[in-house]
Amino acid sequence: MKDILIDKARGCLIGGAAGDALGYAVEFSSLNSILKKYGPSGINAFDTDSYGIACFSDDTQMTLFTAEGLLTAAQKGEADNPKAVCSYISEAYLAWLDTQTGFQLPLPSSWLTHVRDLWARRAPGNTCLSALSALKDGRPVNNDSKGCGAVMRIAPIGIFFAAHSSECGMHNSQCKIRQCAKVAAESARITHLNDLSTLASVFTALVIFECMKTHVIDRLSFRSIISTAINETLTAIPDSPKSKEFIEIIQKSLDLAGASISDREAIAQLGEGWVAEETVAIAIFCVMRHIRDFEGCLVAAVNHDGDSDSTGAVAGNIIGTMLGYTGIPEKFRNGLELHDLLVSVADDLAGASSETQMNERYAMHHPYGIDEKLKFISGMKFTPENITELGPDDIFVFGSNLAGHHAGGAARVARQRFGAIPGQGVGLQGQSYAIPTMQGGVETIKPYVDDFIEFASNCDQNTFYVTRIGCGIAGFKDEEIAPLFKDALKLYNVRLPESFVRILLGC
């Protein structure tokens, strides 16, 4: 039974990340735009970056930080105290907030912040950002949001309490079901205060809980799981004025799953998934319609007008739990961003990791018990020393002069290979970007570096490779130039020379 729980836990996190990554590529695209770009079947395989990686969004990032908070509470012996658990989850979300807005340096209270690739801004939701910013500043969270930012991160709670339900002495593990519901409700309310968000989050956590505990699931047993999850949700959140509305849309999703209607027509009747109850309804529809077909479920869940990554993530969490990791096609595992990390965290949630590993991660907040900064650096991507070719979305950033002579060093490479224009000394030109470095001291370079950082921050689709500007013909030292790029460490799409990064991080 333990092996089955581990397989299901891995399937849940990998399935959710796969649905997230598949949908993230088309999150802000209309269905017509998706079909025009990917063909009549829509997107049905990962759209990877120049490294062949299928990147996921803030949905999976926050899912990982939910797991970190929950497991920190467990490691400290407080997993049975929902308020304490949610306090740790809240702290983990504040660490995630730093990865979106802060200076890129590992935090002493979070081992996930040692993972360089999580320091990436992936279209984070405004409600999550504003609510967590308020908490960070000591202000109360004040909104009535029913956005999907809570439900899309809830899966680890269902995994954890199901995996540890054998520890409960009550019949049918009712104590763990109630704890799961309470933690899901409180964790949702960290950022989203509308009851529909809370209902959707509790329901989803409980569906995952029940899927973890049920070996083989068909349509009939899935209906039973949904019925149980609804009843337990209403017990956990009694007398909510939103209960009727939530139950109605879940029932509608089940009715549509059995109707003679296409996936796209049905999903259009359920909404676009920007709000919690629509996200869950679309996910339930897709799982029920494609009960044993992982790919069919995900393809249906992301090809629509709306929040494709969140509907894909929640559908992927649920069907991934049903089928397990071994039931997920290789095309949705290979190339998935941070695949091994997701599997490792799933094992942590399922209770399969060693006590040493759990202590290092969730008590000491060290990923492997080695120096944090060096470990952080080892996971970073730097500008190669010699760049001879670029991908179609890559930009070569070089030091120039105001006259735009481009005669030597990296400037000559930019002119010969990457479209730098003679006579243009500043800014974007072809697949290169010029930063003047020969007009005076370091203080004269800084405004141009600041302009570059602002430019790069608005070009998420591009990757910028910054060379050791000013450290060649201009005669400056790395120690003088590197500090100018401090704010560039916030940008996941900017690569810096390793020497600059080591200086910035004090290594």
Image (tube, rainbow, N blue to C red):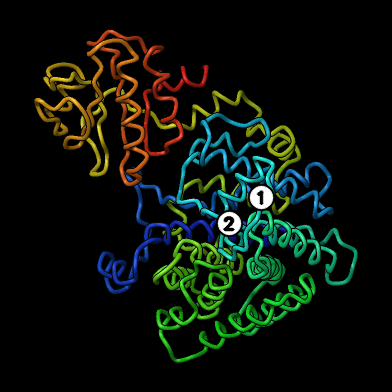
**Is the C-beta separation of discs 1 and 2 under 8 Å?**
yes
Q: Is residue 218 above or below residue 469?
A: below
Residue identified by numbered label 1: 67
The image position of residue 94, as x and y in percent, is 63, 42
* Viewer-nearest residue: 86 or 440: 440
Q: Amino acid at mark 2?
A: Leu
Q: Which quadrant of the rendered structure holds the N terminus? A: bottom right
Residue 135, percent from left and from top: 66, 45
Q: Earlier in the sequence, mark 1 or mark 2?
A: 2
Vertical placement of residue 490 versus 14, above or below: above
Q: Which mark, residue 410? A: none
Q: Secondary structure at mark 2?
A: helix
Left or right for 19, reference 84: left
Residue nearest the viewer, comparing 485 with 68: 485
Judge by depth and name the residue closer to the eye, 456 or 226. Answer: 456
**Residue drawn where x is 82% and y is 61% of the image:** 166
- Let me know if residue 35 appears in the view: yes
Instruction: Estimate how packed mark 1 is, as few (under 14), some (14 to 19) or many (20 or more) residues with alpha carbons within 10 Å.
Output: many
Can residue 7 be spotted in the picture? no
Q: CA distance from mark 1 to mark 2?
A: 10 Å
Q: Pointer 2: residues within 10 angstroms few (<14), some, or many (20+)? A: many
Residue at x 50% of width, y 76% of height: 286
Q: Is residue 335 above or below residue 304?
A: above
- Kindly give the residue lying farthest to the bottom in the view shown: 260
| Residue named by callout 2 | 13
Of the pair 213 and 362, the residue shown nearer to us: 362
Q: Residue 153: x, y in percent?
A: 60, 57
Q: Quadrant of residue 115?
A: top right
